[in-house]
Amino acid sequence: MSTSSLPTVPSTDTSLTEMGTYEGSAGPIKLFGFDGKPLAETPDWKLYAAKIESLKGQMALMKISSTIEGNAVLNWEEYVLIVMQLMADDIDAGTHDTEVTPKHGVFFPRIHEKIDTDDGRVALVLSFHPSILSYRELKPLSAIPSDKRIDLKTSMWILGKSLKLATFFHEAGVSIGNVGADNVFITQDNLEVHGVFYFDFSYAEMDPDPAIFVKEISEMAKTVWFACGGTETTEPPLDADIMNPEQHQEYVANLKRMMDGTDVSGARVEMDHLYEINDRIWPKEPIKDGPNSRGQTMKRQFHYFRLLGR
């Protein structure tokens, strides 16, 4: 599992410039950079914005290999994303529970088109679930200012959604590859999704050592631990307006156990246990419009993404 950092993608259009149009199989795709340069760049690939006309003008992203030798990275990522998206589409097509939101396919990109460039490099146009209109909705967790932290209830839904993604991938025998804060994006302004998005899967593995799955679960817990104000030596602060000291102790102890990694079960078990804690601290509330499609009358409380001072 790679620990290399992903570059931060700017969220402003101040210097967004059109760099040409690619005639895709489903219609034109307009490509954009910032002042003619990539939005972001790693040793393996460069990143540009891509406006996909056939998807109602969705502002998506395009990865292009930095070198011909680097094509293998994107070819592998293409394979992983296609396999997992087909599985997600199959599962989501049969899911009608209003509490299951976002659905599996919204957690990660889908391959809209693969491009073989004239100079022999590979490019992937990465689109999103229709509920995400633009890459600008995706805020990297690593971009939280150093003097700010998320509250513990925000950390709860971030970790819960991350474990849902891990359950989906791990039970399919696939690792995510990078679960650090630089690869965790929050759709904090999109009330329809209110979720978590993982962008880069170039380090994913098929049928890895099972210890990698445990490591990813542990790293997910560490990511929210630091995001909600914990350090190497201190616990995240108590948010007295949303939990009491005993509830704080239970929640923090669970994070510590997951971070330690020696007593970690599979992603589904950890997700279910986390939501059991959630439902004790923040009990479900009645659905205002009556039972949902599965006859459920209660739902979990909605909680906005919230930043506090450290």
Image (cartoon, helix red, strand yellow):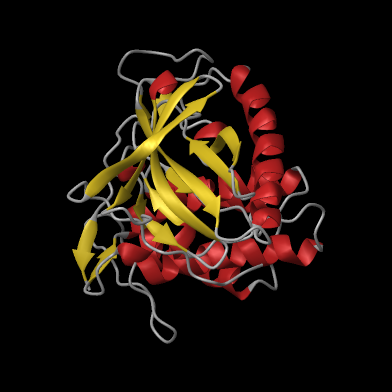
In this orientation, does residue 60 appear?
Answer: yes
User: Residue at the location (76% across, 66% down)?
Assistant: 211
User: Residue at the location (65% across, 25% down)?
Assistant: 91
- Is 284 on the left-hand or right-hand side of 267? left
Q: Quadrant of the C terminus?
A: bottom left
Place of residue 30 in the rendered image (x, y in percent of width and height, measured from the top left): 38, 33
In this orientation, does residue 193 appear?
Answer: no
Name, please, the residue furthest toward the bottom.
Answer: 233
Residue 65 versus residue 212 in the image, above or below = above
User: Residue at the location (70% across, 73% down)?
Assistant: 262
Residue 79 versus residue 290 in the image, above or below = below
Quadrant housing residue 70: bottom right
Residue 266 versus residue 29 in the image, above or below = below
Name, please, the residue furthest toward the front.
Answer: 118
- Is 82 on the left-hand or right-hand side of 257? right
Q: Quadrant of the N terminus?
A: bottom right
User: Residue at the location (54% across, 15% down)?
Assistant: 294
**Which residue is at the front of the view, 243 or 255?**
255
Place of residue 89 in the rendered image (x, y in percent of width and height, measured from the top left): 62, 25
- Is 17 on the left-hand or right-hand side of 132? left
Place of residue 163 in the rendered image (x, y in percent of width and height, measured from the top left): 57, 50
